Image (cartoon, grey):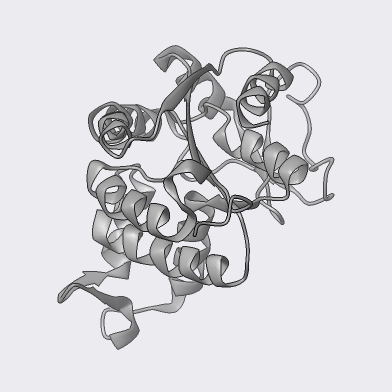
Amino acid sequence: MVDKQRQIVILFGPPGAGKGTQAELLSDKLSLYAFDTSKILEEGFKQAKNLTEDSPERFIEVDKEKFDILKEKELWTKGVLCSPPFVTYLIKEKVKKLFEDGENIIFSGSPRTVYEAEEEIPYFIDLYGKGNIKAFFINISAEQTIFRNSNRKICELMRHSILFNKETENLSICPLDGSKLLKRELDTLETIKVRIKEFQERTFPIINVFEKQGIEVCEINGEQPIADVFKDILLKLT
């Protein structure tokens, strides 16, 4: 019998839709583990910075196929989605551990492709139960994506994303943890346009996978103030 207290919340949407921000807010409010695939990849690639062409550790084998960490990092820095089996492997391993630890999870930006969704969603259902999985599509325009990502800064320590407005445009230190604010490698105009195209062609179609698995996707207006987006999502969860 599935434990009704178990819960998975999945947020997806275009780059800059505020998935990470909402995940942090909901994580604090509902005691959910904030699972940010971008951060997991970023941290993994950062740890792999000393890998060379001759390093045997540069390969991960998934279903008898080897994936090169250095090549995956190259895709990531160009704004192209990493190989779905590679990403799915990392996600399943982490989710299994979190489930065993009794954690409930909120995903921001994962799954990212139809392949990942087809592999991950049944896995999540087996662990947590279909009725305990909620999905939200936070929708913003391409113009908003470009504006938000072009001006976005993150902090060096905790990788918080700082919303761009008149009050924050001249900030150089994160008000949350005091570390230096930086621009991400992914936030160049050229890379942002690639990421928009990747989202439209490879991520948006996962809505069909959710529907086939019997999970309703609730669309949220992501161009509202952060507090209103949070309120809309919370209303559907409680």
142 vs 10: above or below? above
> Where is residue 59, by image quadrant?
bottom left
Q: Is residue 60 left or right of residue 227?
A: left
> Where is residue 9, by image quadrant?
top right
Residue 31 percent across, percent down from the top left:
73, 50
Between 225 and 120, the one nearer to me in the picture:
120
Residue 223 percent across, percent down from the top left:
57, 13
Q: Is residue 88 left or right of residue 155?
A: left
Q: Is residue 196 left or right of residue 42?
A: left
Residue lying farthest to the left in this orientation: 64
140 vs 27: above or below? above
95 vs 115: above or below? below
Between 120 and 15, the one nearer to me in the picture:
120
Whether residue 83 appears in this view of the structure is: no
Residue at image position (76%, 40%) is 29
21 vs 66: above or below? above
Residue 24 percent across, percent down from the top left:
68, 42
Residue at image position (48%, 45%) is 185
Q: Is residue 63 left or right of residue 112?
A: left
Residue at image position (23%, 48%) is 115
Q: Which quadrant holds the C terminus?
A: top right
Residue 181 percent across, percent down from the top left:
71, 43
Residue at image position (67%, 28%) is 234
Whether residue 26 appears in this view of the structure is: yes
